[in-house]
Amino acid sequence: MLGYFEWSGEHTYRDLTACLVDTAFRFDEMLSLQSSNIDLNGNKIHLYDSKNGKPRFVPMTKRVREIMSIRKALGLFSSVKYLSYMDSWKRMIKHVGFDEDVVLHTPRHTTASHLVQAGIHLQVVKEVLGHTSIQTTLRYAHLAPSNIETGIEALEA
């Protein structure tokens, strides 16, 4: 995804997509961010108005910090329009050869998948994604095939 946006010269979309993957923010949450949401000193992004109505913060990866450091002075992603991004997204899907199941929410699912596969506790994944219920987060549990082995190892210890 990022390679396509780089190749096509759509650097704003590349940065936006990278931030979506690294923060697990929903598309509209990312677009609603203002400079005041970005705490470069504390290395986190504060989201005061999320889908579930509860504020949360997400620490920034190195990549997000670099992007936000540059984009903070540019109005972050305020210039991005949904329809334009979706047109580009569809071109990217076709060009890269993804099937049509790759949707705008895919970066968020990618974040959850990476966290679960890295062995991050589901409660932490829940907080990063801003889920109100662990039941929603449990949809990703099947992606951690070593959980059973890890559980038995804990019992052995």
Image (spheres, grey):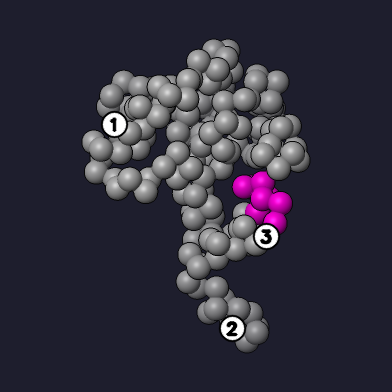
Task: Name the spot of residue 78 as percent of width and height, x first.
Answer: 55, 17
Residue that badge 2 annotates: 152
**Gap in angstroms between the C-alphas marked 1 and 3:** 35 Å
- Are the two marked residues, 1 and 2, in contact with CB atoms closer than 8 angstroms? no
Residue that badge 1 annotates: 91
Kind of residue at badge 2: Ile
Q: Label 1: how many residues lie within 10 Å, few (<14), some (14-19) or many (20+)?
A: some
Q: Label 3: how many residues lie within 10 Å, few (<14), some (14-19) or many (20+)?
A: some
Whichever of labels 1 and 2 marks the residue nearer the N terminus, that label is: 1
Which of the 4 image quadrants contains residue 86?
top left
Residue that badge 3 annotates: 134
**From which residue to which does the magenta span run?**
126-134
What is the quadrant of the C terminus in the image? bottom right
**Gap in angstroms between the C-alphas marked 1 and 2:** 46 Å
Horizontal relation, residue 49 to residue 81: left or right: right
Task: Name the spot of residue 73 as percent of width and height, x first.
Answer: 58, 13
Which numbered disc covers residue 114? none
Report the residue at 35% width, 22% height from top.
10
Whichever of labels 3 and 2 marks the residue nearer the N terminus, that label is: 3
Task: Name the spot of residue 6 as percent of width and height, x first.
Answer: 32, 27
Q: Nearer the viewer, residue 88 or 56?
A: 88
